[in-house]
Image (spheres, rainbow, N blue to C red):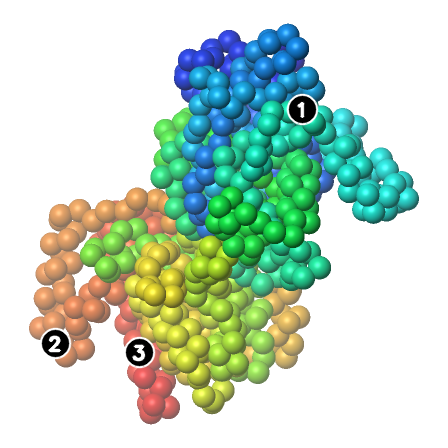
Amino acid sequence: MPCVGDWLNSPLSIVQGIFAQNAPNSDWEKKVTEYFKEKLKENNATNWVPSLNDVPVHYLKPNSLVKFRCMVQDMFDPEFYMGVYETVDPNTNARVLHFGKYRDVAECGPQQEIDLNSSQTVTLERQTFYCVPVPGESAWVKEISFLTEPVQARVSPSTSYTPSRHKRSYEEDEDMDLHPSKQKEQHMGKSCWCGGDIHGCVEPKRLETEASAGHHVISPNCSPPLDLNFPLPGEKGPACLVKVYESWESFKVNDVLEVFGVLSVDPVLSIVNSEERDSSTLDPMECMDTAEEQRVHSPPASLVPRIHVILAQKLQHINPLLPACLNEEESKTCEFVSNFMSELSPVRAELLGFLTHALLGDSLAAEYLILHLISTVYARRDVLPLGKFTINLSGCPRNSAFTEHLYRLIQQLVPASYHLRMSIESMNHSRLIPHKDYTANRLVSGLLQLASNTSLVIDETQLEQGQLDTAGVRNVTALGNLITWQKVDYDFNYHRMEFPCNINVLITSEGRSLLPSDCQVHLQPQIIPPNMEEYMSSLLTAVLPSVLNKFRIYLSLLRLLDYSISDEVTKAVEEDFVEMRKNNPESVTADDLHKMLLVARFLSLSAGQTTLSRERWLRAKQLEALRKARLQQQKCVNGNEL
């Protein structure tokens, strides 16, 4: 019987035990899922599972249980694999039943052959997702996630597993490179490779559990380096091929997931690639894929490991300071929320003070920035996204790198963000919109392929006069559509496909932005620091880490709260609006009412109130009046400001 720790180090042995007890009954698969689900509930066991976000793949034991926090960047075509297969010993005619689930390679003993004509063989289907780390994930999210794991889950498990490469000398490595057959012999254990023609296992071969053949063809000497297809430049971390076996239809592109599964970095996958690259010709009947598609869909496992998913869940958020799921009526979750809500008022006051200093002493702009940071699309009415609150912060200093430093502060508060420096050159040359590459049969990422609740800071302060080319116009249009409709139209060459999103957009500009916005707030600095970098850096160092964490919890938690307006308050708001129209019919429009209701919504939530009160409604009206008066004042100074 497997020991207690085997579910972490050798999950396939657990699966084998359940399979042996229950096969060929199909219930064995459900029992495997239930087993690991129960294990992960015990004593914060999820923290004991090594994470690919924190530990380099070469430090992890192959076929061990791992977790991965990721975004679905692309979905490949479903693939077939041998869910159950039978091996036979030609000498004794003894037959053994095996499972192929959670494996890239089907196990086969040295004296055994796979009986492809066995009546016990079951061919099943699985879905492959190409997953990348969450784009723009803040450094503090990675750091806190790493520190909350037990030491055993994050230290290199060198005492129990050392990559075989470290055991060979340099001369041996060179010998392996010169004689690939030796490398192949080293890896030929009790497994069989399933390629085009299959004649059992007379010679030691590997049997991949995918039914399709010829997936890896390209010459490394002639091909460019493998593009891991991260949406944002400078991103680090592994990309993974995530193999999903159940309920894959519930996941979609751009979903943020946490998956628990079996890590597969089997060297045979690279060997097969090498064998097929060495082949001078391919039978077109055996391989319908292009060489580029094979290269992209079957990259080396050392660069793009495979995870065979046992459990997967969509994440509401990626803030490690909050419970993973706030919808559950668990006592710990309820206790966490109630405890934090009890101290919400001082946290809000401190955050307002912090942001006021960051905005050079402008407390009104700080109020609106808080409302922006907790805003989220909570529903869609036809094509209209409800809850978006894009702010155009105009009046920003042009030559002081103000936006750069403001972004760094925001980056310390939100779990994921990106700073887009808008210029004629960047608009003409950046790839903002994801597009379909039909040659490689993949979705090529763009800067706007972001996860929900990502903060996007667009800096217009460096924008100068110039000519936008066709690509530049398309990129600016895409930004406008993102802000107005919270959607990005992905380019599929022959048509466009809408992908809804939920991105918090903050635009900084000197005058009014050329992009649309829900609310323009003109910055009125009360202080002009002689050294902007030193001033902004001192703000962060002055905040205690514990206070900074409270700010992070505050902003993440409030955007997840439900909100409603009672019939009584609704009636009072309507009557108030009628009175406002009577007094000044031209200056108060339906759009103004919508904006005031939006401000009132986020103002209430920012105070921890999930319903609108008369007090908050009056405060929302007051804020809007101050904001409009400031814009009117600016218009008088600069006639073309509005």
Q: Up-down: is 156 above or below 214?
A: above
What is the CA distance from the residue labelled 2 to the residue labelled 1?
A: 89 Å
Query: 313 or 77: nearer the eye?
Result: 77
Task: Residue at 58%, 79% (x, y): give it.
Answer: 400
Marks 1 and 2: in contact by CB < 8 Å?
no
Residue 50 in view, yes or no: no
The local secondary structure at tag 2 comes to loop
Q: Amino acid at mark 3?
A: Ala
Query: 474 or 270: nearer the eye?
Result: 270
Query: 91 or 38: nearer the eye?
Result: 91
Residue 336 x %, y %: 45, 34
What is the CA distance from the residue labelled 3 to the residue labelled 1?
A: 85 Å
- Write down the residue under mark 1: 202
Q: Up-down: is 428 above or below 366?
A: below
Residue 51 falls in which quadrant of the image? top right
- Write down the residue under mark 3: 629
Q: Where's the N terminus, which quadrant?
A: top right
Residue 603 x %, y %: 33, 56
The local secondary structure at tag 3 comes to helix
Q: Amino acid at mark 2?
A: Pro
The local secondary structure at tag 1 comes to loop
The earlier-in-sequence mark between 3 and 2 is 2
Task: Residue at 39%, 42% (x, y): give it.
Answer: 251
Left-right relation of 297 to 57: left
How crowded is the residue under tag 2: few (<14 C-alpha within 10 Å), some, or many (20+)?
Answer: few
Q: Nearer the viewer, mark 3 or mark 1?
A: 1
Residue 326 falls in which quadrant of the image? top left
Q: Amino acid at mark 1?
A: Val
The earlier-in-sequence mark between 3 and 1 is 1
Residue 585: assigned label = 2
